Image: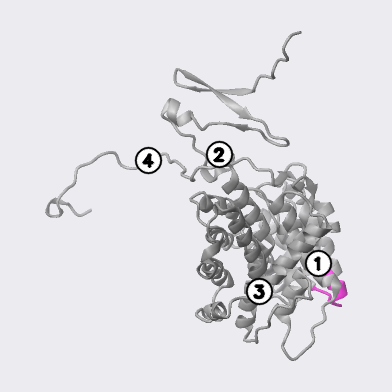
Amino acid sequence: MAAKKEPTQAVAKLCVNDQTLDLPVVQASEGSSGIDISKVLKQTGNVTLDPGFSTTASCKSAITYIDGEAGILRYRGYPIEQLAKQSSFLEVAYLLIYGELPDAKQLSTWVTRIKTHRLLHEDFKAFFTAFPANGHPMSILQAGIAGLATYYEDTIDPLDPEKRDLQTILLMAKVPTMISYIAKRAAGLPLLYPAAERSYTEDFLRLTFGLPYQSYDIDPAIIHALDTLFILHADHEQNCSTSTVRVVGSAHANTYASVSAGIGALSGPLHGGANEAVLRMLGQIKNSDMTVKDFVQKVKNKEDGVRLMGFGHRVYKNYDPRAAIVKSLTHDVLERMGQSDELLDLAMELEDIALSDDYFVERKLYPNVDFYTGIIYSAMGFPTKMFTPLFALGRLPGWIAQFREMISDPMTRIARPRQVYVGETKRDYVPLRRRQSK
């Protein structure tokens, strides 16, 4: 009986001058497969050049799948639409971090462990008073997360699975408390202690808006809306902040340091500040004599100072699957709060015009997740400066999951990108007295 023939691995051929290399193709379970170029430098003396790494896969990952052309987003194989409708943020966090949806006992243990660690150390609370109350919350949050390592030094070894798991619990538990305290100090209001009888998102809202002398009842629809927004932001493949977490972690930095670095990346306006920019854009239209049609025409004319925010995405070339969910949430939140929002009306009109205009359709400029989120956050009472910290809280389990996957992957090497040097070639030092003024 003939032996079973193993399938031949696909290869790509790279020709460099008179040399031809066979490059193995790493097959993806879905989406784009990868051409392994790891030996190109050794075998040819050349590196590949890919500014912004837009066509370079830095790792293999089993966490999140995106098909930008089809508008698909899945966590561990589960469509984002199903998770947003049926799951909770902590359940999704467990899925991302541990790889499978929890059973009832696993979920109960997970939730209980997080609730147990929601308190901040009393000395650590004083840490926040060292910063100006009106300082940017992302800068304070970044320092606070990095500072956790000084209070929990016995947990910082990223190569110890038990300690790595405790880092996971401490981050999931304490970051929402930190964010609420940052918001409270900025508003000059007294801090509250976490309440174990409340759910994760419910207690975050109470900590952020509640007062010691008042009972604080929260509409379940508002809790659900914010919990859903956290789910929508929980992970998004190898974006700027997630890649930063992996790069820092590849040096065997602890989870606190790595997530803190991710916070720094997210604070950039090209990454985490898009929903703030959408509100500014809508406010610009509202406070001017422009109609929405006038604004759209200015965008098409590429007039100075006029930019369309909240449309288009680096990955999605179709309607962002998260945007449709957020749009529905926006209506629900405003209706439950008895608000009519002029900015929402402007946003809907702008979306309708853009989706029917050939200029935007041809360029595949569809609304993204940021287009409506700022309106929801604002309606809930969050100041604009807190929008990006809310994004960070939602993205936290994704960063942790990506860190854990990276640190456990035997293929991981310390990140060390190459460059193509285009500076001066060798030249000799000229003493100061002989240099000519230019």
For label 3, the SS is helix
Which sits in the foreground, 119 or 344?
119
Which sits in the foreground, 213 or 43?
213
Structural crowding at the residue carrying mark 4, measured as other residues with C-alpha within 10 Å and reported as few (<14), some (14–19) or many (≥20): few
Return the residue found at the far top. 1
Magenta stretch? Answer: 333-341
Q: Are marks 1 and 2 in contact (CB under 8 Å)?
A: no
Q: From where the camera sits, is residue 347 visible?
A: no
Q: Is residue 249 shown above or below 33?
A: below
| Number of callouts | 4
Q: Are marks 1 and 4 in contact (CB under 8 Å)?
A: no
Provide the residue designation for mark 4: 422
Provide the residue designation for mark 3: 177
Which amino acid type corresponds to the residue marked 4 in the rendered image? Val
Q: Residue sitting at 79 percent across and 52 percent down?
A: 101
In which quadrant will I find the N terminus?
top right
Which amino acid type corresponds to the residue marked 2 in the rendered image? Met
Name the N-terminal-most of marks 2 and 4: 2
Horizontally, is 297 left or right of 17 in the view?
Answer: right
Name the N-terminal-most of marks 3 and 2: 3
Which amino acid type corresponds to the residue marked 3 in the rendered image? Thr
Q: Are marks 3 and 4 in contact (CB under 8 Å)?
A: no
Give the label on residue 225, or none.
Answer: 1
